């Protein structure tokens, strides 16, 4: 399976309270102006992802569902001693590991992930409830910052559609010298955030054979034009891709179960559905592109 099936996160994503509770935590963070103005963490949280592989005929094959917990690090930021406490009876503590990003499109993270063979197994290993994040930054420590799941569930898996010159094309007919329009059926489960922090997002990413996230539609709080549920498509500009190459990609629709600000840092919990797909560009292959001669 290609890199995107587990090396991903993608998404973002996590939760906490209703408007009143969110306001309370915002007031608490204002009592700590150092952390409120911290410059090391973009956001943090946890997600459960329904995953599918799309084939050439647009059919979808179910993949193992995924859990992740992440802390997204700002450019030049530092995070250490990161852990998350699970909502199981034993309150088990799991360490998050640093993961460097080679892409200019997406930053480094502290990361924990796990797969399950079924959704029932995913729930046993990563139960619904409150996840507590703790970590250290040069600005100060975060202790047991809570994000939790409730109310919502996985959205419908998106189906990926390619268009060029105003026409639908096959996944092996992409002309790298033209704009590529990536689209999908409407994200009907998506909604605006009742707390006004972050609306339900859409993510589009493409991996090459040598660079993860050579194309990324952007993560919230890092890129102003990131996609929300309102987006109908995403354009990959001409000549970003190379002729005669194979790429891996995904489109993800994510719904937040709630949103919060704690210690000046946004936190979320999410249910997401990701569709992965491999595609090829037409033209002569440059064997050196993938480091092969």
Image: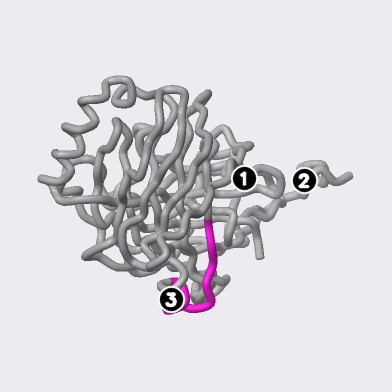
Q: Secondary structure at mark 1?
A: loop
Task: Tell me, yes or no, if residue 19 can be seen here.
Answer: yes
> Of label 1 and label 3, which has the lower sequence position?
3
Q: CA distance from mark 1 to mark 3?
A: 27 Å
Q: Secondary structure at mark 2?
A: helix
Which label sits in the foreground, 2 or 3?
Answer: 3
| Callouts 2 and 1 close, C-beta under 8 Å | no
Q: How many neighbours does mark 3 have within 10 angstroms: few (below 14), some (14-19), or many (20 or more)?
A: some
What residue occupies the far left of the structure in this picture? 20
- The residue at 44%/50% (across/down) is 84
Residue 286 figure quarter = top right
Compared across the picture, whether 204 is left or right of 232 comes to right
Residue 29 rendering spot, x and y as whole percentages:
24, 30
Q: Which residue, given by chain and number where applicable, does mark 3 sit on?
A: 119
Q: Position of residue 120 (x, y in %)?
A: 42, 79
Q: Mark 2 or mark 1: which comes first in sequence?
A: 1
Q: Quadrant of residue 144?
A: top left
Residue displayed at 29% across by 51% down:
15
Of marks 2 and 3, which one's residue comes earlier in the chain?
A: 3
Query: Magenta stretch containing residue 116, yes or no?
Result: yes
Residue 212: give its label.
1
- Residue 42 lies in the magenta-colored region: no
The one of 292 and 153 positioned closer to us in this rendering:
153
């Amino acid at each position: 399976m290609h890199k995107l099936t587990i090396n991903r996160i993608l998404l973002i994503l996590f939760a906490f309270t209703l408007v009143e509770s969110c306001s309370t935590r915002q007031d608490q963070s204002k009592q700590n102006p150092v952390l409120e103005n911290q410059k090391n963490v973009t956001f943090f949280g946890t997600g459960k992802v329904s995953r599918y592989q799309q084939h050439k005929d647009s059919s979808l094959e179910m993949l193992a569902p995924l859990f992740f917990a992440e802390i997204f690090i700002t450019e030049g930021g530092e995070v250490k001693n990161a852990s998350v406490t699970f909502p199981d009876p034993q309150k088990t503590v799991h360490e998050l590991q640093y993961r460097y990003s080679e892409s200019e499109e997406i930053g480094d993270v502290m990361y924990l992930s796990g797969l399950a063979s079924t959704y029932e197994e995913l729930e046993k290993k990563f139960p619904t409830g409150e996840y507590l994040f703790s970590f250290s930054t040069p600005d100060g420590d975060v202790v047991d910052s809570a994000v939790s799941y409730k109310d919502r569930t996985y959205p419908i898996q998106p189906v990926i559609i390619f268009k060029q010159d105003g026409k639908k094309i096959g996944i092996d007919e992409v002309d790298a010298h033209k704009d590529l329009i990536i689209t999908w059926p409407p994200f009907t489960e998506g909604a605006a955030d009742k707390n006004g922090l972050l609306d339900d997002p859409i993510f589009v990413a493409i991996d090459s054979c040598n660079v993860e996230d050579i194309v990324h539609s952007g993560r919230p709080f890092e890129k102003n034009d990131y996609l929300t549920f309102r987006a109908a498509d995403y354009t990959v500009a001409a000549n970003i891709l190379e002729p005669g190459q194979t790429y891996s990609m995904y489109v993800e629709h994510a719904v937040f179960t709630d949103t919060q600000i704690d210690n000046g840092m946004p936190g979320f919990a999410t249910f997401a559905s990701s569709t992965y797909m491999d595609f090829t560009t037409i033209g002569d292959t440059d064997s050196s592109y993938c480091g092969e001669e």
